[in-house]
Structure formats: structure tokens, C-alpha cells
Image (tube, rainbow, N blue to C red):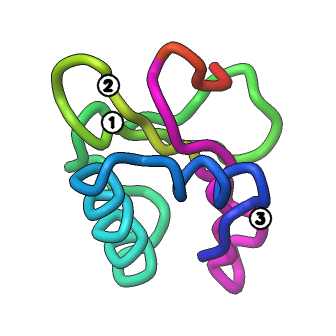
Amino acid sequence: MTFAAKARKQASKLPARIAERLDALQLTIEAFGPVLPDLIHFGKLKNRKGEIYHCHLNKGRPTYVAVWAVQDRTVQLVEVIYVGTHENAPY
């Protein structure tokens, strides 16, 4: 799993407990694949090209989300394209 340049910069600004959850999400995606319906508010983003998924990293306000895209399903290449608050998420 890789991070887009913008997502890497966003991840560096996250609060510590949210950053830990992002790290746990990364390990989970690497272990089980990009489709994880047991996550909090997990979903596939509609009206988007390709396979793009999101989940909430916490409950409450502000709510932080992660958005990732499956680049190549045969080799399980996944790229995080957004990490940050729900208000600014690209959906």
C-alpha cells in the first residue's frame, strides 16, 4: 500500500491517536485486501472511476476518514488518496 504525495502530507498532520488508527488500517489492508466491510462506515464511493473505498477512522467530531483506490487488483496495489476530516473528503 502506498500513499499519494498529498495523502502523505495530510497523514503527517493527523493527531497521534488518528495516525495510529491509520497505521492499523494500513496493516489491515495489507493483510486482508482493500475491501473491508467490518470497518466503521466502510463503503465504496459511487460515481467515481475505478474502485475507490473509504472508512471513518474515528467516531465523533471532527470525524477523520481515509480514502483509498485499488490501482491493480491482480497485484493488490492500493494507494491512499486522502486522509483527513470528513468535511474535506473528496466525495
Q: Callout 1 environment at 10 Å: few (<14), some (14 to 19), or many (20+)?
A: many
Query: Residue 76, position in %: x, y?
Result: 63, 78
The amino acid sitting under disc 1 is: His
Query: Residue 40, position in %: x, y?
Result: 22, 38
Q: Earlier in the sequence, mark 1 or mark 2?
A: 1
Q: Earlier in the sequence, mark 2 or mark 3?
A: 2
Q: Quadrant of residue 46?
A: top right
Q: Which mark is residue 34?
A: none
Q: Is residue 33 magenta?
A: no
In the image, 44: left or right of 69?
Answer: left
Give the labeled residue for mark 1: 56
Kindly report the distance in space between the C-alpha atoms of the residues bearing marks 1 and 2.
7 Å
Q: Give the magenta-colored segment's residue range.
A: 68-86
The residue positioned 48% from the left and 39% from the top of the image is 54
The amino acid sitting under disc 2 is: Thr
Classify 37 as above or below 3: above
* Marks 1 and 2 close (CB-CB < 8 Å): yes
Q: Callout 2 environment at 10 Å: few (<14), some (14 to 19), or many (20+)?
A: some
State the residue in front, 13 or 81: 13
Give the labeled residue for mark 2: 63
What secondary structure is found at the residue carrying circle 2?
loop
Classify 16 as above or below 51: below
In the image, 41: left or right of 69?
Answer: left
Q: Which mark is residue 71?
A: 3
Q: Earlier in the sequence, mark 1 or mark 3?
A: 1
The residue positioned 31% from the left and 20% from the top of the image is 62
